[in-house]
Image (cartoon, rainbow, N blue to C red):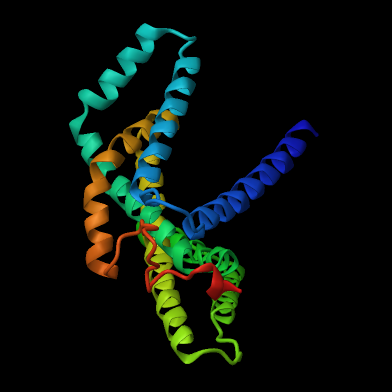
Amino acid sequence: MASANLKYLSLGVLVFQTTSLVLTMRYSRTLQGDGPRYLASSAVVVAELLKILTCVGLVFKDNSYSCRALSSILRQEILHKPIEMLKLAIPSGMYTLQNNLLYLALSNLDAATYQVTYQLKILTTALFSVSMLDRRLGVYQWLSLLILMTGVALVQWPADSPSDPKKEQMTAGSEFVGLVAVSVACCSSGFAGVYFEKILKETKQSVWVRNIQLAVHIPHNRSQTRCTNYKIFGQESSPTNSGKKSSHIISDEKLE
């Protein structure tokens, strides 16, 4: 009974965390104010640093709060295993790209459209699991994925509402940027998740140590990701508020 209650509690916390994160990110990316807006890459780095601190604390707890054991594990797993660190550089780079693209997508899509479209990561994860982990999906699982794709397609169906042609063109352009960003993020999320799962199955190290190894690469990927976003989308994922509104970003007036 206790385990069942814990599962439902975990599900509720996960739903709250996911929805509140999306709404908070969307609000912070569209809020009009004085001065430059924060860089998306900086937000990603700060989040990963907090993740490192959390995982270090959990490893510290698993080793009976021994500083010597913690230091030995971190030194052995990070400094003395360069091959393992190189393997984790691949999903780390994909996660960095994904997280930056999510900020870009939320800057150009409303929260509801983003949340539904981002569920395509379930489809990409399933496809990568079949190809990389040799998993087999049943008929009902493939049918569920087909229904998911249909739902995402219906969300993108254009609404017939008369509006200013110039304003409509700018909105369509920004929506296209957001949809491309979230689609690439779904692919990178699926690949990185399956690749990381494959590494976890091949080794006996705890998931907390693996997360530390994964997060260590994130700060090094920050500048490369910003350059990639600029080259692909023609803009950085961190627009500034210097009195001018970017033509690719949906302002509050366009959302009304």
Q: How many marks?
A: 0
Q: Is residue 157 above or below residue 94?
A: below
Give the residue drawn at x 53%, y 58%: 26
Q: Indicate the quadrant where residue 200 lies.
A: top left
Q: Position of residue 34 (x, y in %)?
A: 44, 52
Would you say 68 lies left or right of 9 here? left
Give the residue drawn at x 26%, y 53%: 225
Q: Quadrant of the C terminus?
A: bottom right
> Can residue 134 be seen from the camera position used here?
no
Q: Position of residue 78 (x, y in %)?
A: 26, 26
Near-viewer residue (163 or 10): 163
Q: Quadrant of the N terminus?
A: top right
Give the residue drawn at x 22%, y 66%: 231
Give the residue drawn at x 49%, y 17%: 62
Q: Position of residue 77 (x, y in %)?
A: 28, 25
Q: Indicate the quadrant where residue 66 lies.
A: top left
> Can residue 19 be seen from the camera position used here?
yes
Question: What residue occupies the far right of the structure in this picture?
Answer: 1
